Image: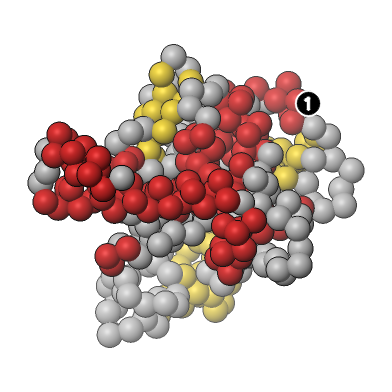
């Protein structure tokens, strides 16, 4: 009737700490230690954790928080990301940031597409393409994408796709559709890289990559990102006076618990157990197969057992009242008689 879930860490933090700033939110998330793919043994202590398997989005500062809150990019950043067109009609990609490779003596690198260089004509006697080409098109080698060129002359074209379609791309095919003997002008992108040892240095050199400029923090409400497997529209947040709260609409949208009455969405008792696990630093409860430790957790932390039992009662009586169409007064009267 409920389990702690790694996906519910952010809603649980906000549930227990309503009215926090984004900086406070980031700090509290950074103090959690959860993992969906690392399991603990019963002998390990509740507060033990393995940094190697941390959930990255809870430890990535404002960028991580923006992702959790599903904030859109600013109009300014969207424009920055648009590719430019050079004098040959070829795209020049906007600069982008990558984390440094493991073992590097720096933290971030900015990749810059400086320009494109066009080579001398080159005949390609047997090459493939997903799309039908004509002179002036840019061809890209379909398997590895390691070679491309500007098509100047087509000497032979053969359709090799399915269903005998010779004039248009077979949208359902998995492989290239056309084989060519053609002449291209090879295109080579000229790239450079800038290295930075900290976020602060990166943002000083490239203010456009600062979270304040990348994400729209003016958004006043939204839903949490709960990973790829759960409905992301039920657990909701809102902002008031620059402080974040769990939107009370959440409690009208969520079920009692995961798989309760056929529900596949995370629910109220799941939220409470996740919040209780965070309160007691019980990280192995919010881990791979953490549900195996639930009974031990409830035994070791009686206060959490009481919260859990109350959550089960609250959620199921509330859902029952909704199904019966009870008024608030009738519901409260029912609760008084049963409590």
Residue 237: name its quadrant.
Answer: top left
Q: Counting other residues with Cα less than 10 Å from the Cα at mark 1, is it few (<14), some (14-19), or many (20 or more)?
A: few
Q: Position of residue 142 (x, y in %)?
A: 53, 69
Count of residue discs: 1
Closer-to-camera residue (159/84): 84
- Kindly identify which residue carries mark 1: 201
Q: From the viewer's perspective, is residue 225 above or below residue 85?
A: below
The residue lying toward the viewer, choosing from 311 and 216, is 311
**Residue at x-position 38% and y-position 24%:** 220
Q: Position of residue 234 (x, y in %)?
A: 33, 46
Please tell me which residue lies in front, 125 or 256. Answer: 256
* Observer able to see residue 140: yes
The residue lying at 32 percent from left, 41 percent from top is 251
Q: Residue at x 27, y 79 (%)?
A: 165
Q: Is residue 7 left or right of residue 61?
A: left
The residue sitting at the top extreme is: 241
Q: Classify 200 as above or below 47.
A: above
Q: Is residue 135 visible?
A: no
Q: Assign a secondary structure to mark 1.
A: helix
Q: Position of residue 102 (x, y in %)?
A: 82, 53
Q: Position of residue 243 (x, y in %)?
A: 48, 20
Q: Quadrant of the C terminus?
A: top left
Q: Quadrant of the N terminus?
A: bottom left
Which one is in front, 76 or 211? 211
Instruction: Please give left or right for residue 53 compared with residue 134 in the image.
Output: right
Query: What residue sits 84% from the left and 40% below the top?
Result: 106
Q: How is the image coloured?
A: secondary structure
Q: In the rendered image of this protein, does residue 288 appear above or below residue 105? A: below
Quadrant of res 124: bottom right
């Amino acid at each position: 009737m409920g389990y702690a879930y790694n996906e519910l860490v952010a809603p649980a933090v906000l549930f227990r700490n309503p009215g926090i700033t984004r900086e406070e939110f980031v700090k509290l998330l950074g103090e959690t230690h959860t993992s969906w793919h690392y399991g603990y043994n019963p002998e390990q202590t509740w507060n033990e954790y393995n940094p190697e398997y941390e959930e990255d989005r809870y430890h990535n500062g404002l960028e991580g928080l923006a992702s959790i809150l599903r904030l859109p990019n600013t109009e300014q950043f969207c424009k920055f990301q648009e590719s430019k067109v050079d004098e040959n009609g070829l795209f020049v990609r906007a600069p982008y940031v990558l984390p440094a490779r493991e073992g590097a003596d720096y933290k971030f690198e900015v990749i810059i597409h400086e320009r494109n260089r066009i080579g001398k004509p080159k005949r390609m006697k047997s090459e493939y393409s997903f799309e039908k080409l004509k002179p002036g098109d840019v061809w890209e080698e379909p398997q590895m994408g390691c070679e491309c060129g500007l098509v100047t002359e087509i000497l032979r074209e053969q359709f090799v796709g399915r269903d005998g379609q010779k004039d248009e791309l077979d949208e359902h095919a998995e492989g290239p559709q056309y084989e060519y003997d053609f002449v291209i002008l090879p295109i080579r992108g000229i790239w450079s890289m800038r290295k930075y040892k900290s976020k602060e240095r990166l943002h000083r050199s490239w203010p456009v990559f600062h979270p304040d400029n990348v994400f729209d923090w003016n958004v006043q409400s939204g839903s949490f990102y709960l990973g790829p497997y759960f409905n992301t529209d039920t657990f909701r947040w809102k902002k008031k006076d620059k402080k974040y709260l769990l939107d009370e609409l959440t409690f009208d949208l969520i079920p009692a618990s995961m798989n309760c009455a056929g529900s596949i969405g995370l629910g109220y008792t799941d939220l409470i157990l996740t919040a209780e696990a965070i309160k007691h630093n019980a990280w192995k409860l919010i881990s791979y197969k953490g549900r195996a430790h639930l009974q031990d957790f409830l035994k070791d932390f009686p206060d959490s057992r009481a919260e859990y039992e109350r959550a089960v009662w609250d959620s199921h009586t509330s859902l029952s009242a909704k199904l019966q169409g009870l008024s608030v007064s009738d519901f409260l009267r029912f609760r008084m008689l049963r409590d």
